[in-house]
Image (tube, rainbow, N blue to C red):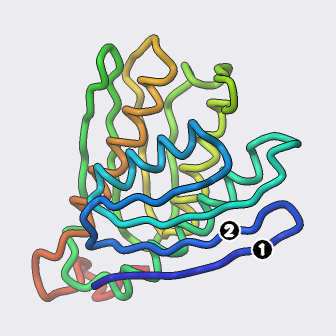
């Protein structure tokens, strides 16, 4: 089983994560931010991962530090769980509808971090406890620390909740496909992924 367990403590956040890449969609999440818990649960269930997460953050300031730091630590867990990436599919692209919203996520589990994020519709949206700009911050932290090349394209949508759901679900489904073991080889002409 490809698993990782990590802790990260700063002056702004105290986070612990247990992550299983080959899970069954079990989510036990308390980020301190209700909407973000919902998004992380969707990510876990649709990726068939197992994720236990606890975060105590300075949410009295805002949710930024907690969301970004969770992305950092979860990305590191994904990277550790993947090991040398031997046998993985490596590439995947998934498009997910969520009612009126449509989002595509394309991923290369290459070891070379990069993120393209085209979801301007969410750049000025807020819910009761969540700034939707933080979706980009989380995904960037996840990609950079996970060694993922990640392209997110939100094609359209009008409901902010639905647009965020489409993003999290499409990324989860793409990652699930890309990390599937399909051979006994490193999927690179170089013989290494980094």
Above or below, 66 relative to 118: below
Residue 117, position as x, y percentages in the image: 51, 39
The residue positioned 42% from the left and 49% from the top of the image is 41
Q: Nearer the viewer, residue 97 or 154?
A: 97
Above or below, 7 relative to 131: below
Query: Which numbered circle lies on residue 9?
Result: 1
Q: Are marks 1 and 2 in contact (CB under 8 Å)?
A: yes
Numbered disc 1: secondary structure: strand
Residue 182, position as x, y percentages in the image: 11, 75
Residue 96 horizontal side relative to residue 119, left or right: left
Residue 133, position as x, y percentages in the image: 65, 33
The residue positioned 43% from the left and 52% from the top of the image is 150
The tally of labels here is 2
The residue positioned 29% from the left and 17% from the top of the image is 99
- Indicate the quadrant containing the N terminus: top left, top right, bottom left or bottom right: bottom left
Numbered disc 2: secondary structure: strand
- Indicate the quadrant containing the C terminus: top left, top right, bottom left or bottom right: bottom left
């Amino acid at each position: 089983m490809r698993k990782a367990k990590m802790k990260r403590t700063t002056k702004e956040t105290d986070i612990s994560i247990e992550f299983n890449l080959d899970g069954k969609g079990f989510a036990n999440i308390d980020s301190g931010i209700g909407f973000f818990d919902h998004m992380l649960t969707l990510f876990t269930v649709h990726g068939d991962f197992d994720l236990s997460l606890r975060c105590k953050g300075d949410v009295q300031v805002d949710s930024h530090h907690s969301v970004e730091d969770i992305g950092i630590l979860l990305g590191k867990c994904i990277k550790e769980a993947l090991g040398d990436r031997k046998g993985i599919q490596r590439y995947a692209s998934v498009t997910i509808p969520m009612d009126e919203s449509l989002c595509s996520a394309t991923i290369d589990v290459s070891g070379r971090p990069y993120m393209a994020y085209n979801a301007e519709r969410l750049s000025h949206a807020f819910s009761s406890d969540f700034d939707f700009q933080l979706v980009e911050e989380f995904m960037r932290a996840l990609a950079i620390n996970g060694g993922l090349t990640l392209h997110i394209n939100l094609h359209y949508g009008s409901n902010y909740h639905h647009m965020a759901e489409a993003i999290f679900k499409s990324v989860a489904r793409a990652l699930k496909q890309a990390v599937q073991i399909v051979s006994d080889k490193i999927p690179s002409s170089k013989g290494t992924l980094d």
